[in-house]
Image: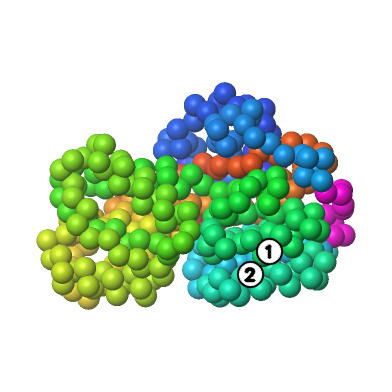
Amino acid sequence: MTPHIRTAALALAVLLTAAACAKAEDPQSAPATASTAGQQVVQSPSGAASGPTCTLAQFGGTKFDLKTATVGFSQSEKEANPFRIAETKSIKDEAAKLGISDLKVTNAQSQFSKQITDVQQLIAQGVRLLVIAPLNSDGWEPVLQQAAAKKIPIITVDRKINAKACSDYLTFIGSDFYEQGKRAADRMIEALSGKGKVAILLGAPGNNVTTERTNGFKDRVKEKAPGITISFEQTGEFAREKGQQVTEQLIQSNPDINGIYAENDEMALGAVTALKGAGKEAGDIKIVSVDGTRSAVQGIADGWLHAVIESNPRFGPLAFETAQKFLDGQPIPDKVIISDRGYDTGNAKDSLGEAY
């Protein structure tokens, strides 16, 4: 596939004007445009543009100029993870491209209490717009109350917060995590021919990504492959080192395991290290993961991973395009769901340069 960059403006236009096509889109067979600098929007909250929307008038805020306003971005996790590196870079690059002169960026270093404090400090510094990559889905009440009092719109990316759209926050931009889990299950079912024992390396607790990727995987396996047993589940906290540790325990307690579903690439790569240390050969245990980092795609090419479902971190263009449309008085959906590609042995080598 030849990489083709679609602008965020076009993507959002698809969202708002081509609902019928969006509803019919199958994320598993969707074009790979989500692996480039822009994302392809595939559906609004209910799969149609007629779902819940929000306007500046409904929200009750005041229009301002993004270029001269103070804008805050709150990153949740340490930027040792390629996903977070690419996510922050996308926000910074798009802000610079648009001429936003005062972008303030914080990093919570994977500490939720610090993220709350970070955002509160951004509010105190006079931000007019907040873009937040939440560490957890719950516990945001103090921030939401302070932002609401000042009518500061909040766009959440990657993970959701459990609050009310167009009131507590503006909108969520990200992937369909339940669908990612289903697609990962399809690849695992394929790898094991529908039979075997599978372990799940769970993501960090307390956020919707872990919950939905787990539920999607389990529901799909139950539906399509009763011959597959999920015999081990333990959190690897979305971290490579923890994924390695958990897999080392897994090998000892479940030596007959056939497959590992890692809910992000970092844990999958940690699992590979553990398998190598135990003397396993590439392909002995089938690994399917979610993210689409370059190292994981290389792992497919090298035979250690079976497949990777992409979760695109390049939210900058859509985040700022959504904010601008909102400020211009146009209706914004309460969710902007993007299409993610997949990597396997058929495309990993040729697509390596498109991974992040």
Residue flagged by tag 2: what amino acid is it? Ile
Residue 266 drawn at (x, y percent): 40, 66
Tag 2 residue: 116
The span shown in magenta is: 61-69
Image position of 355 with respect to 192: above or below = below
The picture quadrant where one finds residue 116 is: bottom right
The picture quadrant where one finds residue 279 is: bottom left
Q: How far is disc 2 from disc 1 in space, using C-alphas?
A: 7 Å
Quick one: label 2 or label 1, which is nearer the N terminus?
2
Q: Does the segment drawn in magenta span residue 66?
A: yes
Tag 2 secondary structure: helix
* Dominant secondary structure (helix, strand or loop) of the stretch shown in magenta: loop
* Label 2 Cα crowd, 10 Å radius (few <14 / some 14-19 / many 20+): many
Task: Tell me what residue is drawn at x 61 percent, y 62 percent.
Answer: 140
Residue flagged by tag 1: what amino acid is it? Val
Residues at discs 2 and 1 in contact (Cβ within 8 Å): yes
Residue 63 drawn at (x, y percent): 87, 48
Residue 15 drawn at (x, y percent): 63, 34
| 318 displayed left or right of 27 | right
Image position of 5 with respect to 98: above or below = above
Residue 104 drawn at (x, y percent): 74, 69
Tag 1 residue: 143
Task: Tell me what residue is drawn at x 16 percent, y 72 percent.
Answer: 252
Task: Tell me what residue is drawn at x 15 percent, y 69 percent.
Answer: 253
Q: Does the segment drawn in magenta span residue 64?
A: yes
Q: Specify how the rendered protein is coloured.
A: rainbow
